Amino acid sequence: MQIESGNIRLIALTHEQVEMYRNTDYRLEDSLGLKRTARIIAPQYSNALGRYTLSWMKEDPANELFATVWIIVEIASNSIAGEIGYKRKADENGYIEIGYSIQVEYRNKGYITEAINLLSAWAFTHPEVKAILAETLDDNLHSIKALQNNGFKRFSYSRPFEPQDTGYTQETDKMIWHKLEKPNSK
């Protein structure tokens, strides 16, 4: 599945494509006809893709699009600028959690803001989705701004801290939550 806007195209990856994406050896770019670039994936993110994302996709194929990686392709260069996605289907409250990352050379171009907008609009076409949550470090001002530009508001939410694969620790990293409610869902 693909979603496109003026500057970017989001492409939902299959199980096999997520495996290729983790390896950064250009197999994914070559298979999709994209320009090869030196993209970087943090080891903890690659591990999380293997440990969680691929498992979730396999366990619940009907909701695969809520678990997979959607690559962000810069249309002008036809290259992978980053990734975005959800951490599984909506929970019992109708909440889904979004996460995203942008390669250094594509930062400050508005691509994350645009990608959040596209994927949020897509998610809200599903009746079970009532709100989208995002967790950021309290000092990640660019991420916070991208969320605010899409209508997200700070939100008090308590969920157990997940330090094992993130590289963050509860002692040193302050995380904050943001929420975007589905239009007309109140």
Image: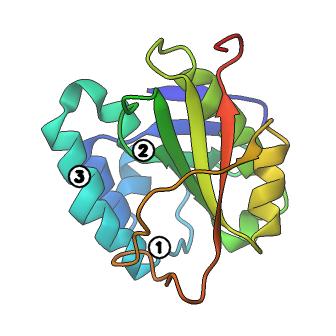
Pick the front one: 18 or 166? 166
**Could you say which is closer to the camera, residue 110 or residue 17?**
110
Image height check: is 36 above or below 77?
below
Q: CA distance from mark 1 to mark 3?
A: 16 Å
Disc 3 or disc 2, which is closer to the eye?
A: 3
- Would you name the residue on which mark 2 appears? 32
Q: Which mark is residue 54?
A: 3
> Between 86 and 184, which is closer to the camera in this rendering?
184
* Residue 142 pos. (x, y %): 81, 63
Q: Nearer the viewer, mark 1 or mark 2?
A: 1
100 lies above or below 123 = below
| Residue 85, percent from left and from top | 49, 45
Taking the spot 18% from the left edge, 51% from the top edge, the residue there is 55
Question: For the residue marked with disc 1, what is the amino acid?
Answer: Ile
Mark 1 neighbour density, 10 Å: few (under 14) some (14–19) many (20 or more) = some
* Residue 23 visible in the snapshot: no
* Alpha carbons under labels 3 and 2: distance apart: 20 Å
* Mark 1 / mark 2, whichever is N-terminal: 2
Q: Which residue is mark 1?
A: 41
Residue type at the position of mark 3: Leu
Secondary structure beneath disc 1?
Answer: loop
> Is the C terminus in the top left, top right, bottom left or bottom right quadrant?
top right
